[in-house]
């Protein structure tokens, strides 16, 4: 099954992944939907995909993107790549916050790379 697609220029979700870990730490991929008979010491891991994104990431408020970094939903690198938001640690509080000037400059260099919207 393909991953969920985003709407209104949102991104596509990551795919569902399943793997099987043996007692010695070996890992092999298995089908996300199917039957697996596990032996003692084996573990089945299934990483479920989330939903697709909603809205153009370049339209997201920079302060909210910094909140996403603080919450651990995305890394500062991913915030820069996806949302064109520069997030740095505040020297006093050590908390992530968006750099207004750097974000403005970065967003000025990025055009909206839109495909045909899905609804």
Image (cartoon, grey):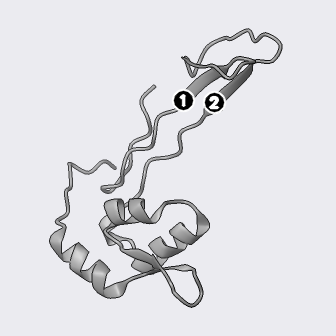
The location of residue 71, given as percent across then percent down, is: 60, 67
Which residue is most to the front? 24
- CA distance separating discs 2 and 1: 6 Å
Answer above or below: position of 4 versus 17: below
Residue drawn at x 50%, y 46% is 51
Marks 2 and 1 close (CB-CB < 8 Å): yes
Residue 27 can be seen in this image: yes
Left or right? Give the position of 20 relative to 3: right
Residue drawn at x 30%, y 55% is 9
For marks 2 and 1, the one nearer the N-term is: 1
Front in this rendered view, residue 7 or 28: 28
Q: Count how many numbered circles sit on residues in the image.
A: 2
- Location of residue 5 by image quarter: top left
The location of residue 93, given as percent across then percent down, is: 59, 87
Residue receiving disc 2: 46
Which residue is most to the right? 40
The location of residue 3, given as percent across then percent down, is: 44, 35
Residue 61 can be seen in this image: no
Residue receiving disc 1: 17
Answer above or below: position of 78 versus 14: below
């Amino acid at each position: 099954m393909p991953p969920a697609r985003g709407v209104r220029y949102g991104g596509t979700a990551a795919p569902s992944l399943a793997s099987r870990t043996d007692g010695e730490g070996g890992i092999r991929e298995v089908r996300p939907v199917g039957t697996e008979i596990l032996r003692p010491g084996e573990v089945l891991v299934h990483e479920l995909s989330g939903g697709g994104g909603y809205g153009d990431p370049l339209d997201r408020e920079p302060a909210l993107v910094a909140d996403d970094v603080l919450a651990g939903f995305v890394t500062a690198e991913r915030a820069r790549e996806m949302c064109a938001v520069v997030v740095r640690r505040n020297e006093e509080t050590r908390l992530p916050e968006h750099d207004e000037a750097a974000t403005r400059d970065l967003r000025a260099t990025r055009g909206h790379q839109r495909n045909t919207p899905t609804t």
